[in-house]
Amino acid sequence: MGWMEHLARLVRRPEASPKSSTTAAQANKSTFSGLMKVTTSSAKVLLFESLDPQVDARSRNRSVRLPRAMKMAVLLAALAALLGSTASASQIPVRVCYGGNYSSASSYHQSLELLSATLPQKASLAPRLFARASVAIGEATYGLAQCRGDIESAGCRTCIHDGLQGAEGFCGLRKEVFLAYELCTLQLSGRAISWPSRVGISASQPDAATVQSSTFETGMDALVVGVSSLAANTSQLFATAAEEVEADGRHYTAYALAQCTPELTPTDCATCLEDLSFAHLSRGSGGWFATSWCSYSVHLYKFFASQPLRQIPSVTSNTPSGKLAKRKKPLNITPHFYSFHSTNAYTVRTYR
Protein backbone atom coordinates (compact mmCIF):
# COMPACT_ATOMS: atom_id res chain seq x y z
CA MET A 1 0.00 0.00 0.00
CA GLY A 2 1.38 3.41 -1.00
CA TRP A 3 1.75 6.45 1.21
CA MET A 4 -1.25 8.20 -0.38
CA GLU A 5 -3.46 5.24 0.55
CA HIS A 6 -2.14 5.38 4.11
CA LEU A 7 -3.00 9.07 4.30
CA ALA A 8 -6.48 8.41 2.99
CA ARG A 9 -7.06 5.65 5.55
CA LEU A 10 -6.01 7.89 8.40
CA VAL A 11 -8.17 10.76 7.23
CA ARG A 12 -11.21 8.49 6.88
CA ARG A 13 -10.65 6.59 10.14
CA PRO A 14 -13.63 7.25 12.48
CA GLU A 15 -13.11 8.31 16.09
CA ALA A 16 -12.92 5.30 18.38
CA SER A 17 -15.16 4.92 21.41
CA PRO A 18 -13.45 5.15 24.86
CA LYS A 19 -13.68 1.40 25.43
CA SER A 20 -11.86 0.68 22.16
CA SER A 21 -9.14 3.32 22.52
CA THR A 22 -6.41 0.73 22.97
CA THR A 23 -7.41 -1.06 19.78
CA ALA A 24 -7.63 2.23 17.90
CA ALA A 25 -4.23 3.33 19.14
CA GLN A 26 -2.67 0.07 18.04
CA ALA A 27 -4.31 0.37 14.64
CA ASN A 28 -3.11 3.94 14.29
CA LYS A 29 0.41 2.94 15.27
CA SER A 30 0.33 0.13 12.72
CA THR A 31 -0.70 2.59 10.04
CA PHE A 32 1.96 5.09 11.15
CA SER A 33 4.57 2.33 10.98
CA GLY A 34 3.62 1.75 7.38
CA LEU A 35 4.43 5.36 6.55
CA MET A 36 8.14 4.86 6.58
CA LYS A 37 10.40 5.79 3.70
CA VAL A 38 8.89 7.41 0.65
CA THR A 39 11.30 7.35 -2.27
CA THR A 40 11.10 9.79 -5.15
CA SER A 41 13.39 9.98 -8.18
CA SER A 42 15.62 12.47 -6.42
CA ALA A 43 14.97 12.35 -2.69
CA LYS A 44 14.14 10.02 0.18
CA VAL A 45 11.85 11.51 2.79
CA LEU A 46 11.59 9.94 6.22
CA LEU A 47 8.03 10.32 7.48
CA PHE A 48 7.50 7.97 10.41
CA GLU A 49 10.24 5.60 11.44
CA SER A 50 11.84 4.89 14.79
CA LEU A 51 15.58 4.28 14.59
CA ASP A 52 15.58 2.84 18.14
CA PRO A 53 13.92 -0.60 18.41
CA GLN A 54 13.61 -0.12 22.18
CA VAL A 55 11.35 2.84 21.58
CA ASP A 56 9.06 0.62 19.54
CA ALA A 57 9.11 -2.00 22.28
CA ARG A 58 8.13 0.56 24.93
CA SER A 59 5.40 2.01 22.74
CA ARG A 60 3.78 -1.41 22.37
CA ASN A 61 3.18 -1.45 26.12
CA ARG A 62 1.35 1.87 26.08
CA SER A 63 -1.99 2.97 24.75
CA VAL A 64 -1.46 6.23 22.85
CA ARG A 65 -4.32 8.05 21.18
CA LEU A 66 -3.59 11.26 19.26
CA PRO A 67 -6.34 13.88 19.10
CA ARG A 68 -7.80 14.04 15.61
CA ALA A 69 -6.67 17.65 15.11
CA MET A 70 -3.10 16.74 16.06
CA LYS A 71 -3.21 13.69 13.82
CA MET A 72 -4.27 15.80 10.86
CA ALA A 73 -1.60 18.41 11.62
CA VAL A 74 1.10 15.73 11.67
CA LEU A 75 -0.12 14.24 8.41
CA LEU A 76 -0.30 17.61 6.67
CA ALA A 77 3.19 18.51 7.86
CA ALA A 78 4.54 15.20 6.58
CA LEU A 79 2.83 15.67 3.23
CA ALA A 80 4.17 19.22 2.95
CA ALA A 81 7.68 17.99 3.71
CA LEU A 82 7.40 15.32 1.03
CA LEU A 83 6.11 17.68 -1.64
CA GLY A 84 8.59 20.37 -0.66
CA SER A 85 11.52 17.96 -0.92
CA THR A 86 10.39 16.74 -4.31
CA ALA A 87 9.93 20.27 -5.62
CA SER A 88 13.25 21.52 -4.32
CA ALA A 89 15.12 18.47 -5.58
CA SER A 90 13.80 19.07 -9.08
CA GLN A 91 15.42 22.51 -8.97
CA ILE A 92 18.94 21.27 -8.25
CA PRO A 93 21.08 21.56 -11.39
CA VAL A 94 23.90 19.49 -12.77
CA ARG A 95 26.81 21.84 -12.20
CA VAL A 96 30.48 22.24 -12.95
CA CYS A 97 32.64 24.42 -10.70
CA TYR A 98 36.26 25.25 -11.52
CA GLY A 99 38.79 28.07 -11.76
CA GLY A 100 40.00 30.36 -9.00
CA ASN A 101 38.14 31.64 -5.97
CA TYR A 102 36.90 35.08 -5.00
CA SER A 103 36.15 36.47 -1.55
CA SER A 104 32.76 37.66 -0.36
CA ALA A 105 34.25 41.12 0.26
CA SER A 106 35.83 41.44 -3.20
CA SER A 107 34.80 43.70 -6.06
CA TYR A 108 34.17 40.52 -8.08
CA HIS A 109 31.43 39.57 -5.63
CA GLN A 110 29.90 43.03 -5.94
CA SER A 111 29.94 42.73 -9.72
CA LEU A 112 28.36 39.27 -9.48
CA GLU A 113 25.54 40.56 -7.27
CA LEU A 114 24.71 43.32 -9.73
CA LEU A 115 24.83 40.90 -12.67
CA SER A 116 22.50 38.54 -10.77
CA ALA A 117 19.99 41.35 -10.38
CA THR A 118 19.78 42.07 -14.11
CA LEU A 119 20.50 38.90 -16.11
CA PRO A 120 17.23 36.99 -15.40
CA GLN A 121 15.09 39.88 -16.60
CA LYS A 122 17.29 40.53 -19.61
CA ALA A 123 17.17 36.91 -20.80
CA SER A 124 13.47 36.40 -20.12
CA LEU A 125 12.50 39.47 -22.16
CA ALA A 126 14.74 38.64 -25.12
CA PRO A 127 12.92 37.22 -28.19
CA ARG A 128 15.08 34.09 -28.12
CA LEU A 129 15.30 33.85 -24.30
CA PHE A 130 19.06 34.35 -24.45
CA ALA A 131 21.26 37.06 -22.98
CA ARG A 132 24.80 37.83 -21.99
CA ALA A 133 25.88 40.48 -19.50
CA SER A 134 29.01 41.83 -17.88
CA VAL A 135 29.48 44.05 -14.85
CA ALA A 136 32.75 45.61 -13.72
CA ILE A 137 32.87 47.19 -10.28
CA GLY A 138 36.61 46.81 -10.13
CA GLU A 139 36.97 43.15 -11.16
CA ALA A 140 34.60 42.14 -13.97
CA THR A 141 32.02 39.35 -13.94
CA TYR A 142 30.57 37.83 -17.11
CA GLY A 143 27.37 35.84 -17.50
CA LEU A 144 25.62 33.89 -20.24
CA ALA A 145 22.05 32.60 -19.89
CA GLN A 146 19.82 30.61 -22.24
CA CYS A 147 16.31 29.24 -21.64
CA ARG A 148 14.63 26.49 -23.60
CA GLY A 149 12.87 28.17 -26.47
CA ASP A 150 9.39 26.83 -25.76
CA ILE A 151 8.94 28.06 -22.17
CA GLU A 152 7.18 31.20 -21.01
CA SER A 153 9.07 34.36 -20.08
CA ALA A 154 8.15 34.03 -16.39
CA GLY A 155 9.45 30.46 -16.24
CA CYS A 156 12.68 31.54 -17.91
CA ARG A 157 13.20 34.34 -15.44
CA THR A 158 12.58 32.01 -12.48
CA CYS A 159 14.96 29.35 -13.77
CA ILE A 160 17.85 31.78 -14.26
CA HIS A 161 17.12 33.61 -11.02
CA ASP A 162 17.17 30.35 -9.05
CA GLY A 163 20.48 29.39 -10.63
CA LEU A 164 22.09 32.73 -9.82
CA GLN A 165 20.78 32.73 -6.27
CA GLY A 166 22.02 29.19 -5.69
CA ALA A 167 25.36 29.48 -7.50
CA GLU A 168 27.36 30.21 -4.35
CA GLY A 169 25.70 27.33 -2.51
CA PHE A 170 26.34 24.96 -5.41
CA CYS A 171 29.91 26.02 -6.19
CA GLY A 172 31.15 28.01 -3.20
CA LEU A 173 33.24 31.02 -4.21
CA ARG A 174 34.48 29.57 -7.51
CA LYS A 175 34.65 32.09 -10.34
CA GLU A 176 33.95 29.64 -13.16
CA VAL A 177 30.46 28.15 -12.86
CA PHE A 178 28.28 26.22 -15.28
CA LEU A 179 24.76 25.29 -14.12
CA ALA A 180 22.46 23.18 -16.28
CA TYR A 181 18.76 22.60 -15.76
CA GLU A 182 16.56 21.08 -18.44
CA LEU A 183 14.83 24.44 -18.91
CA CYS A 184 17.84 26.76 -18.80
CA THR A 185 21.62 26.95 -18.64
CA LEU A 186 23.81 29.52 -16.93
CA GLN A 187 27.52 30.24 -17.20
CA LEU A 188 29.44 32.66 -14.95
CA SER A 189 33.07 33.60 -15.42
CA GLY A 190 35.76 36.09 -14.56
CA ARG A 191 36.69 36.17 -18.25
CA ALA A 192 34.77 37.11 -21.37
CA ILE A 193 32.71 34.15 -22.60
CA SER A 194 32.96 33.26 -26.28
CA TRP A 195 32.11 30.28 -28.50
CA PRO A 196 35.16 28.00 -28.37
CA SER A 197 34.49 26.45 -31.82
CA ARG A 198 33.96 23.06 -30.16
CA VAL A 199 31.91 21.95 -27.17
CA GLY A 200 33.92 22.41 -24.00
CA ILE A 201 32.07 21.67 -20.78
CA SER A 202 28.78 19.81 -21.09
CA ALA A 203 26.27 18.27 -18.72
CA SER A 204 23.58 15.63 -18.93
CA GLN A 205 20.86 13.97 -16.90
CA PRO A 206 19.77 10.66 -18.44
CA ASP A 207 16.30 9.30 -17.80
CA ALA A 208 16.15 6.52 -15.23
CA ALA A 209 14.45 3.94 -17.45
CA THR A 210 16.48 2.28 -20.17
CA VAL A 211 15.59 0.16 -23.18
CA GLN A 212 18.10 -2.54 -24.09
CA SER A 213 17.67 -2.89 -27.83
CA SER A 214 19.94 -2.17 -30.78
CA THR A 215 16.91 -1.24 -32.90
CA PHE A 216 15.78 1.22 -30.24
CA GLU A 217 19.25 2.76 -30.04
CA THR A 218 19.32 3.10 -33.82
CA GLY A 219 15.96 4.84 -33.75
CA MET A 220 17.01 7.24 -30.99
CA ASP A 221 20.19 8.01 -32.91
CA ALA A 222 18.16 8.85 -36.02
CA LEU A 223 15.88 11.09 -33.94
CA VAL A 224 18.81 13.06 -32.50
CA VAL A 225 20.34 13.47 -35.96
CA GLY A 226 17.01 14.59 -37.40
CA VAL A 227 16.11 17.15 -34.75
CA SER A 228 19.68 18.53 -34.65
CA SER A 229 19.74 18.99 -38.43
CA LEU A 230 16.35 20.66 -38.35
CA ALA A 231 17.39 23.06 -35.56
CA ALA A 232 20.60 24.05 -37.34
CA ASN A 233 18.66 24.83 -40.52
CA THR A 234 15.86 26.95 -39.05
CA SER A 235 16.07 30.69 -38.51
CA GLN A 236 15.33 30.26 -34.80
CA LEU A 237 17.97 27.52 -34.34
CA PHE A 238 15.22 25.62 -32.50
CA ALA A 239 13.28 22.51 -33.48
CA THR A 240 11.15 19.67 -32.18
CA ALA A 241 10.56 16.23 -33.66
CA ALA A 242 8.93 12.89 -32.94
CA GLU A 243 9.54 9.33 -34.04
CA GLU A 244 7.80 5.97 -33.81
CA VAL A 245 10.08 3.07 -32.93
CA GLU A 246 9.21 -0.65 -33.01
CA ALA A 247 11.77 -2.65 -31.07
CA ASP A 248 11.58 -6.22 -29.79
CA GLY A 249 7.82 -6.36 -30.20
CA ARG A 250 7.18 -3.11 -28.33
CA HIS A 251 6.09 0.27 -29.65
CA TYR A 252 7.67 3.53 -28.49
CA THR A 253 6.97 7.16 -29.36
CA ALA A 254 10.02 9.32 -28.73
CA TYR A 255 10.07 13.12 -28.70
CA ALA A 256 13.07 15.39 -29.13
CA LEU A 257 13.92 19.08 -28.91
CA ALA A 258 17.15 20.79 -29.94
CA GLN A 259 18.31 24.39 -29.90
CA CYS A 260 21.35 26.64 -30.12
CA THR A 261 22.05 30.14 -28.85
CA PRO A 262 21.27 32.88 -31.40
CA GLU A 263 24.95 33.90 -31.49
CA LEU A 264 25.90 30.73 -33.37
CA THR A 265 25.83 30.39 -37.14
CA PRO A 266 23.92 27.42 -38.59
CA THR A 267 27.24 25.66 -39.16
CA ASP A 268 28.37 26.28 -35.58
CA CYS A 269 24.99 25.11 -34.31
CA ALA A 270 25.30 21.84 -36.23
CA THR A 271 28.85 21.40 -34.90
CA CYS A 272 27.77 22.08 -31.32
CA LEU A 273 24.87 19.61 -31.39
CA GLU A 274 26.99 16.96 -33.12
CA ASP A 275 29.79 17.32 -30.58
CA LEU A 276 27.29 17.23 -27.72
CA SER A 277 25.67 14.04 -28.99
CA PHE A 278 29.07 12.33 -29.22
CA ALA A 279 30.02 13.49 -25.73
CA HIS A 280 27.01 11.55 -24.43
CA LEU A 281 26.78 8.44 -26.59
CA SER A 282 25.01 6.38 -23.92
CA ARG A 283 21.53 7.87 -23.89
CA GLY A 284 19.54 4.92 -22.57
CA SER A 285 15.92 5.84 -23.18
CA GLY A 286 16.59 9.56 -23.26
CA GLY A 287 17.34 12.52 -21.04
CA TRP A 288 18.61 16.04 -21.51
CA PHE A 289 22.06 17.19 -22.59
CA ALA A 290 23.41 20.72 -22.51
CA THR A 291 26.26 23.14 -22.94
CA SER A 292 26.18 26.93 -22.72
CA TRP A 293 25.77 27.05 -26.50
CA CYS A 294 23.39 24.26 -27.44
CA SER A 295 21.21 21.59 -25.90
CA TYR A 296 18.85 18.78 -26.75
CA SER A 297 16.29 16.68 -24.89
CA VAL A 298 14.92 13.25 -25.81
CA HIS A 299 12.15 11.53 -23.85
CA LEU A 300 9.60 8.76 -24.31
CA TYR A 301 6.83 11.21 -23.47
CA LYS A 302 5.71 14.52 -24.94
CA PHE A 303 7.43 17.24 -22.92
CA PHE A 304 6.69 20.27 -25.10
CA ALA A 305 3.30 21.85 -25.77
CA SER A 306 3.39 22.39 -29.53
CA GLN A 307 3.11 19.78 -32.24
CA PRO A 308 6.49 18.43 -33.42
CA LEU A 309 7.91 20.37 -36.34
CA ARG A 310 8.92 17.13 -38.01
CA GLN A 311 7.92 13.48 -37.83
CA ILE A 312 11.07 11.39 -38.25
CA PRO A 313 10.47 8.23 -40.35
CA SER A 314 9.54 5.27 -38.18
CA VAL A 315 12.20 2.74 -37.26
CA THR A 316 11.60 -1.00 -36.93
CA SER A 317 13.85 -4.03 -36.83
CA ASN A 318 13.22 -4.36 -40.60
CA THR A 319 14.27 -0.80 -41.49
CA PRO A 320 17.27 -0.91 -43.89
CA SER A 321 20.25 0.74 -42.23
CA GLY A 322 20.96 2.70 -45.41
CA LYS A 323 17.73 4.67 -44.95
CA LEU A 324 18.62 5.90 -41.47
CA ALA A 325 20.31 9.20 -40.77
CA LYS A 326 23.69 8.65 -39.19
CA ARG A 327 26.00 10.95 -37.33
CA LYS A 328 29.35 11.66 -38.89
CA LYS A 329 32.10 11.44 -36.35
CA PRO A 330 33.62 14.90 -35.75
CA LEU A 331 37.30 15.35 -36.47
CA ASN A 332 37.95 16.56 -32.93
CA ILE A 333 35.88 14.82 -30.28
CA THR A 334 35.55 16.67 -26.99
CA PRO A 335 37.54 14.78 -24.32
CA HIS A 336 35.27 12.88 -21.92
CA PHE A 337 37.09 14.66 -19.07
CA TYR A 338 34.96 17.70 -19.80
CA SER A 339 31.68 15.80 -19.94
CA PHE A 340 29.58 15.55 -16.81
CA HIS A 341 26.37 13.70 -16.20
CA SER A 342 24.04 13.09 -13.30
CA THR A 343 21.90 10.04 -12.58
CA ASN A 344 20.16 12.01 -9.86
CA ALA A 345 19.68 15.63 -8.96
CA TYR A 346 22.53 15.82 -6.48
CA THR A 347 25.60 15.04 -8.58
CA VAL A 348 28.28 17.74 -8.59
CA ARG A 349 31.66 17.82 -10.31
CA THR A 350 34.31 20.28 -9.18
CA TYR A 351 37.63 20.62 -10.99
CA ARG A 352 40.67 22.73 -10.12
Image (tube, rainbow, N blue to C red):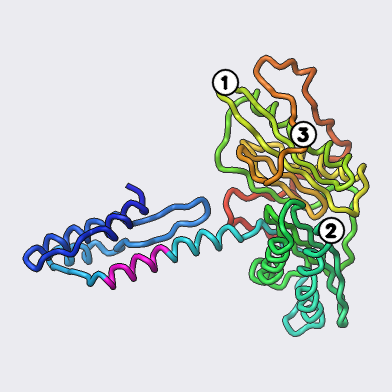
Secondary structure at numbered mark 2: loop
Q: Is residue 1 magenta?
A: no
Q: Position of residue 320 (x, y in %)?
A: 74, 15
Local packing at callout 2 (Cα closer than 10 Å; few below 14, some 14-19, many 20+) is few
Q: On the rendered image, what quadrant is the C terminus found in? A: bottom right
Q: Is residue 88 visible?
A: yes
Q: x, y percentage for residue 337?
A: 74, 49
Helix, strand or loop status at disc 1: loop
Vertical arrangement, residue 135 with respect to residue 163, above or below: below
- The picture quadrant where one finds residue 225 is top right
- Asked whether, in this view, residue 98 is left or right of residue 344, the answer is right
Rendered residue at 68%/56% (across/down): 181
Element under disc 3: strand
Which residue is situated farthest in the left direction here?
19
Q: Circle 1 is placed at which residue position?
A: 248
Range covered by the magenta-colored residues: 69-79
Amino acid under disc 2 = Pro
Q: CA distance from mark 2 to mark 3?
A: 23 Å
Q: Amino acid at mark 1?
A: Asp
**Residue 330 against residue 94 in the figure, above or below:** above
Question: What's the magenta bit mostly, secondary-structure-wise?
Answer: helix
Q: Return the residue at label 3.
A: 310
Residue that mark 2 sits on: 127
Q: Is residue 76 magenta?
A: yes
Q: Residues within 10 Å of mark 1 (few under 14, many from 20)?
A: few
